[in-house]
Image (tube, rainbow, N blue to C red):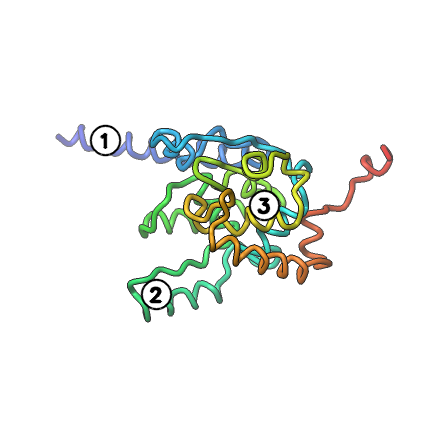
Amino acid sequence: MKNFRIKAWRFIKRLFLFLLISHLVYLILLKWIDPPITATQLWSFLSGHGLARDYVDIQEISPNACYAVIASEDQLFPDHDGFDWKSIQKAIEYNKRKPGRIKGASTISQQVAKNVFLWQGRGWIRKGLEVYFTFLIEHVWGKRRILELYLNVSEMGDGVFGIEAAARRNFKKPAKNLTRAEAAMIAASLPNPKKFTIRPMSGFVMIKYPWIMQQMNNLDGDPDIQKIVFPPKTTAETKKK
């Protein structure tokens, strides 16, 4: 019995070490490669909702889409360390006052951590893992890569994942050609893309997308956002021109 416990403990330690190293290696690799599939995408496919996606580099995405999701989901994205602590505190207070309703305060970084590494849900274990992965991607990937993956893995329609697939599904064009209004419509659907449809346009999207466009106007010229969306050209790129 004693030998069994020793062997079991050794196995658990080796398994833990393997999982620790493998997930860190995977996370580092995702700085340059796209995730083969996410839990949400797999469930969408298995549950019959389909899986339409087409990963594209951020250079192939209209700046309008970048501004639209920042304006709609996380206007402090360039400034925070992955967590909007004021919004989190407000959400906690709101949920205490109205326990029958749930108000979230997830940043773009937190949503990417959840969408890439975890599953949908509100359990404390998942939330704790979300905090852990958010901390890691903020320090390993950087803001531009986080935004790029957000635009590629987020569900933007029933079984539609990523801005490229959403642009082609709704507007019959690639993501790089999205107008401000079209990008704002897609961003407006993000809270619940299965319910808040663009074609046909739901009442929620109809009301929210003009607000998003106004917020995009307010964010125009923000130097911190511009550094993410339009990073400085390298010396090599300048010489090519």
Task: Tell me the number on the disc at residue 226.
Answer: none
Instruction: Say which of marks 1 and 3 sits in front.
Output: 3
Measured in 3D between alpha carbons, the distance from the residue under mark 2 to the one under mark 1, in whole angstroms, is 43 Å
The residue indicated by pointer 2 is: 95
Badge 1 crowding class, 10 Å Cα cut-off, few under 14, some 14 to 19, many 20 or more, is few
Name the kind of residue labelled 1 in the image. Ala
Above/below status of 205 relative to 60: below
Q: Secondary structure at mark 3?
A: helix
Q: If you read the primary sequence from the N terminus, does the residue marked by circle 2 or circle 1 appear first?
A: 1
Residue 34: image location, x then y, percent: 55, 32
Residue at coordinates 52% horizontally, 31% vertically from top-left?
53
Residue at coordinates 33% horizontally, 71% vertically from top-left?
97
Name the kind of residue labelled 2 in the image. Asn
Name the kind of residue labelled 3 in the image. Leu
Q: Does residue 104 appear to the left or right of 57 in the view shown?
A: left
Measured in 3D between alpha carbons, the distance from the residue under mark 2 to the one under mark 3, in whole angstroms, is 28 Å
Q: If you read the primary sequence from the N terminus, does the residue marked by circle 2 or circle 3 appear first?
A: 2
Task: Tell me the number on the disc at residue 147.
Answer: 3
Check the image and name the residue furthest to the front: 200
The residue indicated by pointer 1 is: 8
Q: Secondary structure at mark 1?
A: helix
Check the image and name the residue furthest to the left: 1
Residue at coordinates 41% horizontally, 47% vertically from top-left?
195
Above/below status of 144 relative to 225: above
Q: Does residue 89 appear to the left or right of 175 in the view shown?
A: left
